[in-house]
Image: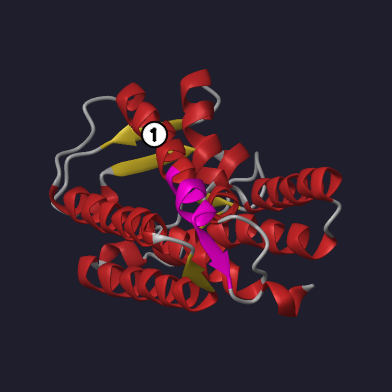
Amino acid sequence: MFIGHYGVGMAGKKIDGRPSLGTLFLASQFLDILWPVFLLLGWEKVEIESTTNSFLMLRFTSYPYSHSLAGAILWSLVFGLVYFLVKKNLRVSIVLGALVLSHWVLDLVVHIPDLQMIPGVGTRVGFGLWNSIVWTIIVESLIFIGGVFLYVKSTKAKNLRGNIVFWSLMGFLALAYIMNLNGPPPPSVRALAFVGLSQWLIIFWAYWADKNRKSTIEASVG
């Protein structure tokens, strides 16, 4: 899943208006931000396959540290704890930790059975929505659109830049998703890892957008 994770991140703004959209995106995509680093270090492995189903071009042979259930729970606790130590805000820390864990839950829905429960244990799970291109696009698009709706309802632009930067980011995410549906397989695992690291551009873009918008629910959350 790609834009669906960002949709869930945007929905987090409706729960609590204080964290920046960049922080919400960082949490919802945290496992996929760790993954390319672990690939480059050789700690996790993936194989590139040629197939007409663009969602199944990658065979995740080993990613126990970033994408096992135990790993996801650990990273969600670490993320929430670090935020709490820095910001001293328990509510937001819980929201962000839940967003980190939500990544694994959404991946469980779309992945074929390749997600480990615990590192070193052979059992793998996945409901396999990726086997259907049409249904994957429908489900992921609905999550993304829902997230956009909730974010827009929960914020308002401070200035013209607040609209331009946000909507250009949404357009970029939608375009990137469409291009990935029809694009060729990555040329190498190393190239794939560097593309994964480029997600930081989206996170910084989100910080920029949110800086020029104001939460409309700040008063209700204290």
Near-viewer residue (188 or 24) = 24
Residue 108: say if magenta.
no
The colouring scheme, among rainbow, by chain, secondary structure or one colour, is secondary structure
Near-viewer residue (2 or 148) = 148
Q: Is residue 28 above or below residue 139?
A: above
Three-letter amino acid code at disc 1? Ser
Near-viewer residue (160 or 33) = 160
Q: In what element is the residue under mark 1?
A: loop
Q: The N terminus is located in which quarter?
A: bottom left
- Would residue 222 appear left or right of 192 to someone viewing this image? right
Percent position (x, y) of residue 201?
Answer: 41, 38
Name the residue beneath numbered marker 1. Answer: 198
Q: Quadrant of residue 183?
A: top left
Percent position (x, y) of residue 200?
Answer: 46, 37
Q: Is residue 146 above or below residue 180?
A: below
Stretch in magenta: 205-215
Residue 212: say if magenta.
yes
Percent position (x, y) of residue 30?
Answer: 57, 45
Percent position (x, y) of residue 4?
Answer: 41, 63
Q: How many marks?
A: 1
Which residue is located at x 48 percent, y 63 percent?
158
Q: The C terminus is located in which quarter?
A: bottom right
Q: Quadrant of residue 178?
A: bottom left
- Would residue 71 appear left or right of 130 to someone viewing this image? right
Circle 1: is it few (<14), some (14-19), or many (20+) Cα within 10 Å? few
- Is the stretch drawn in magenta largely helix, strand or loop? helix
Which residue is located at x 48 percent, y 41 percent?
204
- Would residue 79 appear left or right of 115 to someone viewing this image? right
Near-viewer residue (101 or 70) = 101
Which residue is located at x 38 percent, y 58 percent?
166
Among all residues in the image, which is located at the extreme top?
Answer: 41
